[in-house]
Image: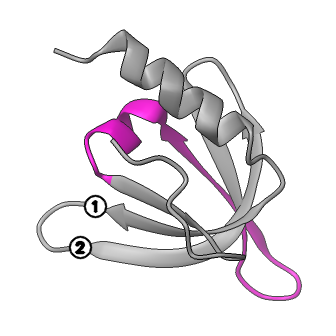
Amino acid sequence: MIDAEALARIRKAVESNVGQKVRLKANRGRRKTYIKEGVISDTYLNLFTVRVDIDTRCVQTLSYTYSDILTSNVELVKCSDNEKICTV
């Protein structure tokens, strides 16, 4: 069962880092992972968005839920000091 207190703690940690450049490591299943760098752009009630610059003319917005961090499907690391944003 998902712990509501842990989700609230994760949400607060992500909200406090809005605007920070992060390295995102996402597990997409069946040994498919990707690593991208971007900026946490917004937080919402159930999800947060990360803006990733693909090239000079193209920007991609990725969205993830806080439970993705809780279940270790997504890992966020600040680029400035290589510190994980939320450790569960």
Residue drawn at (69%, 69%), measured in percent from left and top?
38
Task: Name the side, left or right, on which 28 lies relative to 24.
Answer: left
Q: Quadrant of residue 44?
A: top right
Q: Determine the CA span between mark 2 and mark 1.
A: 5 Å
Point out residue 10 in the picture as x, y percentages from the top left corner: 50, 33
Element at label 2: loop
On-image quarter of the C terminus: top left
Element at label 1: loop
- The residue closer to the viewer here, 20 or 45, is 20
Quickly name the residue at label 1.
Answer: 28
Q: Which residues are magenta?
A: 52-73
> Which residue appears farthest toward the bottom when viewing the image?
55
> Which residue appears farthest toward the right when viewing the image?
57
In the displayed structure, 39 sits above or below 40; it is: below
Residue drawn at (46%, 77%), measured in percent from left and top?
35
Quickly name the residue at label 2.
Answer: 32
Q: Quadrant of residue 45?
A: top right
Residue kind at label 2, given as amino acid type: Lys
- The residue closer to the viewer here, 24 or 5, is 5
Proximity of marks 2 and 1: CB atoms separated by less than 8 Å: yes
Residue drawn at (57%, 29%), measured in percent from left and top?
11
Residue kind at label 1, given as amino acid type: Arg
Answer few, some or many: residues within 10 Å of disc 2's Cα (few below 14, many 20 plus, some between 14 and 19). Answer: few
Residue drawn at (23%, 73%), measured in percent from left and top?
32
In the displayed structure, 53 sits above or below 69; it is: below
